[in-house]
Image (cartoon, rainbow, N blue to C red):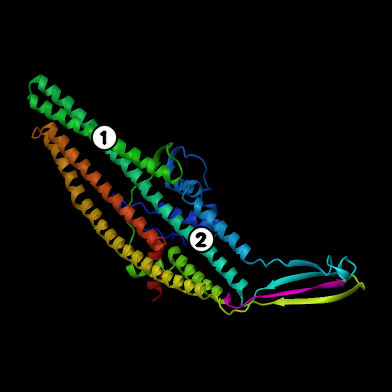
Amino acid sequence: MHLFSKRKQSMPTRACIFYKPFTTAFAVCAFATGTISAELADAIDRPHTGEPQGELTIREAYTYALVNSPRLAGYEIDIRISESETLQSGLLPNPELEVEAEEFGGSGETSGFDNAESTVLLSQLLELGGKRNHRVKTAKLGEDVSRFAYEQARIHLLTEVSKAFISVLAAQEQLELLQQNVKLASQALAGAETRVESGEASPLEQLKAQSVLASEEISARQAERKLDAARRQLAELYGSDDPKFSRASGKLRQSIPLPTQESLKQAFERHPEMLRWAALLEQYRQVVALEESKSIPDLTLGVGLKHFNGNDNLSGVVQFSVPIPLFDRNQGNIRKAREELGKAYQDSRASRINVLVALTSTYRKLEFLRSEVENIEQNLLSSSQSVQEKTYRAYEEGKASYLEVIDAQRMFAEARIRHNETLVEYNKAFFELEALAGRPLSEITSSENNEHENL
């Protein structure tokens, strides 16, 4: 894995996409695999255990998830299993000790042990055809497959943490906006009641104000439930079913320049998923070679001594045996291994195509959402804010009612909520694209700029 570049991006001041914390996710992931320098490692928070308390930053959410998430435990066990298989695959067959006694317990001269013959033989199986070498290579490739699967799982986990954290931030902000609407509606109702009592307004205005307040209170309660669900979803990712943190700390920020699709596809070639498939295909090739080597018979060689009780003499014994591959030449297993290799190749092609399609569609979705964010900022937010300001001036001049002021404020608040919802969609698509590329988008963009400067 690689880290985000530290080159600063120019960012508008109004509203932005949250991207920098995911840099920490890649840094934490790289720190765990030993692929970053000691200087950068010192800048990363040490892993957290237990339950986060107080305000929770996305950096802390990443470290809690990497340490505590049960989703990664199975992958860690798979790596240890693969290492055990590698250890076992390299061990030599145990030698065999054979003791044989004959020419005793019969009749005549062989009735006792005086003429008995005893043999002590030590034999060893010698594997031919490179079987042990192929076994070890197959097992070591299994380790690579397990480690790349683990890396892919960590990228997926960090992506889910990023998306869940953004959902909590957006839910918090939406709740605050709706609580502001409730406060404004309460003020409007109090003003309407005062005007009705003084005869300046009809009871209908008070009823409208009561209806607006009831509607805003319902929306605020729904936002509270949405925030609770988002908090629990985030807590589940770091292994908790009851979040203890008080609130998520962070901001929604603007987008960074997107790299080209061609650069994304080039980065995808170094994705842990592609590296996993490459290791898996090579492992299947080694399995084919291993099964083919099994068609070569192994040699069992033995040496020992034979003792003759009748004259107390000793003689040497040499023994060897080789199976004759007349019927079984491992044809079935060889064919099976070759078919499994062909199936794995087709599965890798299907996986590659699926990810590339997802990468392209996510890239287009990101471009669309970026234009949506810009459109909302340039048109909806500015126009609704202008309406709010003009309505308030009209109210001060006696040309508009207080309810109209409240409606204008609600319109502006709804525009901000829609803006935040679109930002959340953008953020999630952004993190999904980074996960599909396997590298931070800012790093890919920086590489593009460096290539253009070198031309």
Residue 439 appears at what percent x and percent y?
A: 42, 62
Q: Quadrant of residue 347?
A: bottom left
Quickly name the residue at label 2. 146
Which residue is depicted at the point 45% across and 49% down? 62
Height in image: 135 above or below 207? Answer: below
Residue 230 appears at what percent x and percent y?
A: 35, 42
Q: Nearer the viewer, residue 408 or 13?
A: 408
Quickly name the residue at label 1. 220
Which range of residues does the magenta coloring cover?
Answer: 293-307
Task: Kindly identify the amino acid type of the residue bearing the numbered disc 1.
Answer: Ala
Residue 210 appears at what percent x and percent y?
A: 16, 27
* Nearest-to-viewer mark from 1 and 2: 2
Can see residue 124? yes
- Secondary element at tag 2: helix
Q: Quadrant of residue 416?
A: top left
Q: Residues within 10 Å of mark 2 (few under 14, many from 20)?
A: many
Height in image: 4 above or below 400? Answer: below
Return the disc, 1 or 2, that comes first in the chain's sequence: 2
Q: Nearer the viewer, residue 102 or 383?
A: 102
Kindly identify which numbered label has been placed on residue 102: none
Residue 435 appears at what percent x and percent y?
A: 39, 59
